[in-house]
Image: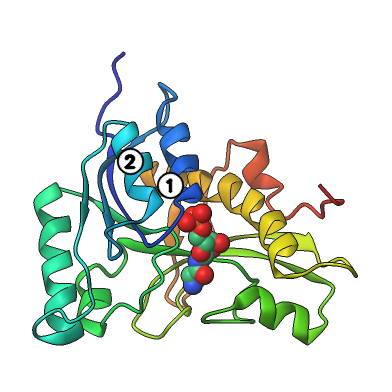
Amino acid sequence: MGKVNRLKLAVLLSGSGSNLQAIIDACTAADYPAEIVLVFSNQPDAKGLDRARAAGIEAKSLGHKGYPGGREAYDHAVSELIAQSGADLVVLAGYLRLVSESFAKRWEGRLINIHPSLLPSFKGLHAHEQTIAAGVKYSGCSVHFVVPEMDAGPIIAQAVVPVLADDDAASLGQRILRQEHRIYPQVIRAIAEDRVVVGDDGRVTVHDSHSPDFAHINPVLARG
Ligand code: GAR
């Protein structure tokens, strides 16, 4: 098919892996410039590992509870697995574990995360509950480069959804997830095509967006 130099992805997750599935699906397109070489979970029973195996992708896990040496040693072991896989880009997709400073630094510029809020609002756990409690009328998701500080780091893309009066965390979460599944594969494509540039001021520019979707990345969507 003449596809050259697909960007190699390591996807890290802790749960369902619906974002992983969106990336797997994107990778099936002949012209998609990336491929998944490793799926890793800190939860050995994560459903996302099954999704990876079903797609014929190498899936590994390492339980973090009681890991000898603590967070630093654990993250070092994870880093080694990623390095062995030959990944160019580390994609956190529902990896519900704070990475250590040394992990963030080792993969700096090659490590991205998706978070279900419009950062810098509602960082950390329970973003949907925080969003509803704050009474904001819009929320969404953010894809950003990871830095040692949690849910900080240069923002690459965001998508907006309305927060409806009768929303609970689950209904809002579902609406946001649909946007996550749309923008995460697009961001990975843009990185693979070398179109994502972080300026000295920490602001990200995405060049030459030839996907109309990416150009309209902040649609305000009606219910559904
Ligand atoms: C997603 O909503 C993702 O944004 C969130 O976990 C969910 C994982 O869903 N991540 C975080 O909250 C990170 N702070 P998935 O396993 O179905 O992709």
User: Where does label 2 land, which residue?
Assistant: 52
Horizontally, residue 59 falls left or right of residue 215, namely left
Q: CA distance from mark 2 to mark 1?
A: 8 Å
Identify which amino acid the numbered label 1 is placed on. Leu
* Residue at screen point 40% across, 21% down: 30
Q: Is mark 1 within 8 Å of ligand 1?
A: yes
Image position, residue 195 (x, y; %): 44, 48
Horizontally, residue 133 falls left or right of residue 154, namely right
Q: Nearer the viewer, residue 157 or 56?
A: 56
Determine whether the residue tagged by mark 2 lies in a helix, strand or loop: helix
User: Where does label 1 land, which residue?
Assistant: 20
Q: Is residue 68 above or below residue 224?
A: below
* Residue at screen point 29% across, 54% down: 89
Horizontally, residue 178 falls left or right of residue 37, namely right
Identify which amino acid the numbered label 2 is placed on. Ala
Image position, residue 26 (x, y; %): 47, 34
Q: How many labels, in total?
A: 2
Image position, residue 1 (x, y; %): 31, 13
Asked whether the viewer can see residue 155, the reply is no
Figure quadrant of residue 51: top left
Q: Nearer the viewer, residue 195 or 83?
A: 83
* Residue at screen point 68% across, 83% down: 130
Determine whether the residue tagged by mark 1 lies in a helix, strand or loop: helix
Image position, residue 136 (x, y; %): 81, 79
Q: Nearer the viewer, residue 222 or 106?
A: 222
